[in-house]
Image (spheres, rainbow, N blue to C red):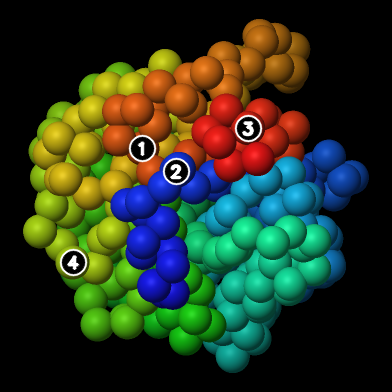
Amino acid sequence: MSTDLATALTEGPPLVLDGGLSNQLAAAGHDLSDELWSARLLAEAPEAIAEAHLAYYTAGADVAITASYQATFEGFAERGIDRTETARLLRSSVELAREAARRAEVTRPLWVAASVGPYGAMLADGSEYRGRYGLTRAELERFHRPRLEVLAEAAPDILALETIPDTDEAKALLRAVRGLGVPAWLSYSVDGGHTRAGQPLEEAFALVAECDEILAVGVNCCAPEDVARAVETAARVTGKPVVAYPNSGETWNAGTRAWDSAPTLTPGRSRDWSAAGARLLGGCCRVGPETITAMARALGRA
């Protein structure tokens, strides 16, 4: 990680993260109805990923999160892709974001966060929002460590341990990132004042308070209404910079198979979260470049 990013996490206006990568890829016409989700395009349409990152950098994002959320050795093996090729695809996720940063016609510093999704993301059955997979912490650590090592070799500025549903997986990840030489942030998926698995946020955030590898902690892929309490709790419990990138706030109607409510993620909310201690702010599902531009302006980044 560059010294500039470490400084930016504590000084000046907060940094702006990108929005939903899958959101931008779908808007460009790519079919993501696949168990590998956007990770499939690492093999089939890498230029589309670079273009999506570029759209967010151009929109005002300071940090792009790579397309490796659902990229795992096990998931690619199901498609007949061997470990050597999977490692190449994982490294390429960082390289594509770097390429987009080079192509972006901006003068501000741009950074890359390598996404590491939860074990449940590989299962593609919704368990990433529940946790408690029936695995031991040691088993979870063995699952995460190999791809963490490969992503670290690609030299991202930071690792994004994101959408983590419970403290068991968080503990496994905190062990898995040791000795990699690349710092990380840890963000939980939450429901109210608890992780998706039901643990109190104070307990969840306290795990990282003394972990030197974790530079920021917070929440993502949650309702905007859940962010304020989480930001305040994370800042108070850990003393670390806080990361927050919720979903748009729209509601999916399973009956009509459509989004049937208005977004509740607004630029004004991002200012409030910044005042409460958030230093990395952006969006997750259903958040596109237009919203990121509005957030960047609200936060004094554009």
Task: Say left or right for 183 vs 179.
Answer: right
Q: Nearer the viewer, mark 4 or mark 2?
A: 2
Q: What amino acid is labelled 2 in the image?
A: Pro
| Tag 1 near tag 2, CB within 8 Å | yes
Circle 1: residue type = Ala
Q: CA distance from mark 1 to mark 2?
A: 7 Å
Q: Quadrant of residue 243?
A: top left
The reply to whether residue 11 is in sight is yes
- Please, is residue 263 above or below residue 140 in the view? above
Check residue 14 in the rendering and tell me which mark sits there, or answer none.
2
**3 vs 4, front mark:** 3
Residue at the location (39% across, 32% down)? 274
Query: How far across and down, in percent of the image, does residue 222 sit?
Result: 44, 29
Residue at 42% of width from left, 16% of height from top? 225
Most distant residue in the top direction: 261
Residue marked by disc 3: 297
Which residue is situated farthest in the bottom direction here? 84
Residue at which label 1 appears: 278
Measuring from the top left, give residue 255's x and y in whole percent.
Answer: 69, 12
In the image, which disc is placed on residue 212? 4
Residue 283 in view (yes/no): no
Q: Quadrant of residue 139?
A: bottom left
Task: Choose the circle earlier in sequence order: 3 or 2.
Answer: 2
Query: Residue 216: percent from the left, percent from the top?
Result: 31, 52
Dot 4: what SS? loop
Gap between marks 4 and 2 measured at Cα: 21 Å
Residue in front for this viewpoint, 112 or 190: 112
